[in-house]
Image (cartoon, helix red, strand yellow):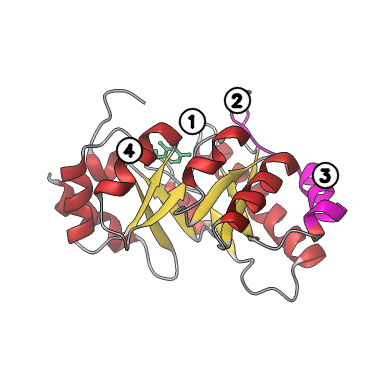
């Protein structure tokens, strides 16, 4: 199947307000244009080097989401255009995002990445760490970021029950944070979970943003 047919298939399974981030890492511009022209304007990349090469060559009304591990010293390269950063995993990183957003007189939407998988390699916070950030005086003085929710990646596994439980744990973390810190902030509403292998389960468990690459563009050669 072609990209457009894939997009149609995926869209049938994603009912608004759930949103699709088309994960375009490693993909050529022509593939991105195909998805853009078919009406999806949200794209996700996981490498700073790659997103800054592509962004100037693509339409201005694309909403760019950063979904990979982000080093503090690289925030400055994406701060002028990034719409949402899904991978906030420290106060230091969040402070830098705030600082760089200020330079451009922008507000950058941020998600706290939680570690929900059993794999050691996946980055992310636990509940206490997220709480510590939100309770810090530094956080409370930040003016140019908006914490909109949480993000997580489930274990890459055939064990669907485990995957489902990991998504449930992310949803629970979201609900607790909402209750503890964001009751009067309607913009705290996002749960970014679900990829090619597990997005249907993620949606059943309350995902509001799915991040899909392979099911849309086909297999990646390197990533
Ligand atoms: C690559 C990537 C995705 C998309 O993965 P697919 O399995 O190709 O759908 C989603 N989220 C993150 C953080 C990624 O790095």
Q: Report, in whole angstroms, how far the alpha carbon at label 1 lies from the one at label 2.
A: 8 Å
> Which is nearer the N-term, disc 3 or disc 4?
4
State the image coordinates of residue 30 (x, y, percent, origin top left): 15, 44
Element type at mark 4: helix
Element type at mark 3: helix
Give left or right: position of 40 versus 186: left
Q: Which residues are magenta?
A: 118-139
* Residue identifier under label 2: 119
Q: Report, in whole angstroms, how far the alpha carbon at label 3 lies from the one at label 4.
A: 37 Å
Which of the numbered marks, if any, corresponds to residue 210? none
Q: Quadrant of residue 196?
A: top left
Q: Report, in whole angstroms, how far the alpha carbon at label 3 lies from the one at label 2.
A: 19 Å
State the image coordinates of residue 19 (x, y, percent, origin top left): 41, 62
Whether residue 71 is visible, yes or no, is no
* Residue identifier under label 4: 53
Observer-side mark, 4 or 2, equals 4
* Residue identifier under label 1: 156
Element type at mark 2: loop
Observer-side mark, 1 or 4, equals 4
């Amino acid at each position: 199947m072609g990209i457009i047919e894939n997009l149609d298939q995926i869209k049938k399974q994603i009912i608004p307000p759930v949103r699709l981030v088309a994960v375009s890492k490693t993909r050529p511009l022509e593939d991105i244009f195909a998805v853009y022209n078919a009406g999806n304007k949200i794209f996700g990349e996981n490498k700073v080097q790659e997103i800054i090469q592509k962004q100037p060559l693509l339409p201005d009304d694309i909403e760019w989401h950063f979904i990979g591990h982000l080093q503090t010293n690289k925030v400055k390269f994406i701060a002028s255009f990034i719409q949402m950063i899904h991978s906030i995993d420290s106060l230091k990183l969040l402070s830098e995002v705030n600082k760089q957003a200020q330079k451009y007189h922008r507000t950058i939407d941020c998600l706290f990445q939680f570690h929900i998988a059993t794999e050691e390699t996946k980055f992310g916070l636990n509940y206490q760490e997220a709480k510590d950030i939100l309770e810090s005086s530094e956080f409370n003085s930040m003016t140019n970021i908006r914490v909109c929710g949480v993000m997580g990646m489930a274990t890459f596994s055939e064990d669907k029950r485990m995957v489902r439980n990991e998504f449930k744990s992310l949803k629970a973390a979201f609900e607790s944070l909402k209750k503890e810190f964001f009751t009067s902030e309607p913009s705290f509403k996002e749960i970014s979970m679900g990829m090619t292998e597990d997005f249907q389960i993620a949606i059943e468990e309350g995902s509001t943003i799915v991040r899909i690459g392979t099911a849309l563009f086909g297999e990646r050669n390197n990533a």
